[in-house]
Amino acid sequence: MELATLRQVLVYLVGLLACFGLWTFVIYWLHRWSHVHHRLNPLWWIHRAHHAEPYLREDSHPKWPTLGQFLFWLGGFRLSLDVVLVMTLPLLVIAWLWPKYAVPLLLFHYFYEVFLSESVLDHNPRITNRLTRWFAWGDFHLHHHVNLKKNYGLMLGLWDFLFGTAEAPAAGASLARIQARLQRLERTRRVAESARKSPAKSNVGGLSSA
Ligand SMILES: [Zn+2]
Ligand SMILES: [Zn+2]
């Protein structure tokens, strides 16, 4: 009896993992399709909003979600629609086809998007090296924001490796890019500041010569 129960649990877990794998496979292709630049491709118009967000920033530390995020409002209309069309809808179809896996899969999707996706895992520049060989987190996904033709996988890197779109960034590359960007911003700020000061100097010069 106990052995039969254990077998049932194992069979259930294998089915659950298979559904999760199928979901990540569909997401990979939908995300890849979202990068087909064509005016008749609404997914590209929607997904562009994700790439317009300044995810590559140093303050991307884990944050407690806002009330909007709890209600699945993920920062804006197109940002939320992007997740719903590319991730939630395929999962609802899978849940409809195999209803016994619906609850754990939908709970996982909700929890991941609300708590983990933005700054904890997907866009956290501190996640590098070994983890990013398996999971599409940190450096792996941030590299997709640099090279839009690579690393389409979400959550798993597997499909990129299988379909030849994986590209490993140098370890810690996103942090280096953030630091370079901050230095550029600082230089721009200093130039703007000295430009603000110099007209004042020339005015003083102008007054003294008058
Ligand atoms: Zn993308
Ligand atoms: Zn992203």
Image (cartoon, helix red, strand yellow):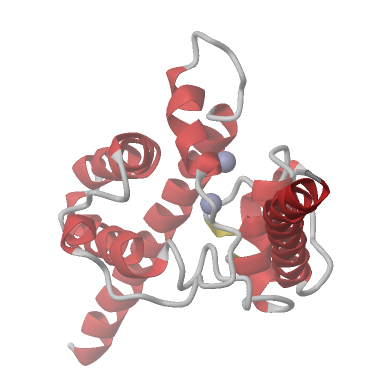
Numbered circles on residues, count: 0
Residue visible at 43% across and 19% down in the picture: 42
Image vertical order of residue 85 relative to residue 184, above or below: above
Which quarter of the figure is the C terminus placed in? Answer: top right
Give residue 150's position: percent from left, percent from top.
72, 44
Q: Quadrant of ligand 1?
A: top right
| Side of 3 relative to 42 (left or right) | left
Give residue 7's position: percent from left, percent from top.
31, 78
Residue visible at 46% across and 68% down in the picture: 119
Q: Quadrant of residue 16?
A: bottom left
| Side of 90 relative to 95 (left or right) | right
| Side of 68 relative to 192 (left or right) | left
Q: Quadrant of residue 91?
A: top left
In this view, the residue in front, 45 or 54, is: 54
**Is residue 160 at all visible to an observer of this figure?**
no
Give residue 37's position: percent from left, percent from top.
61, 19
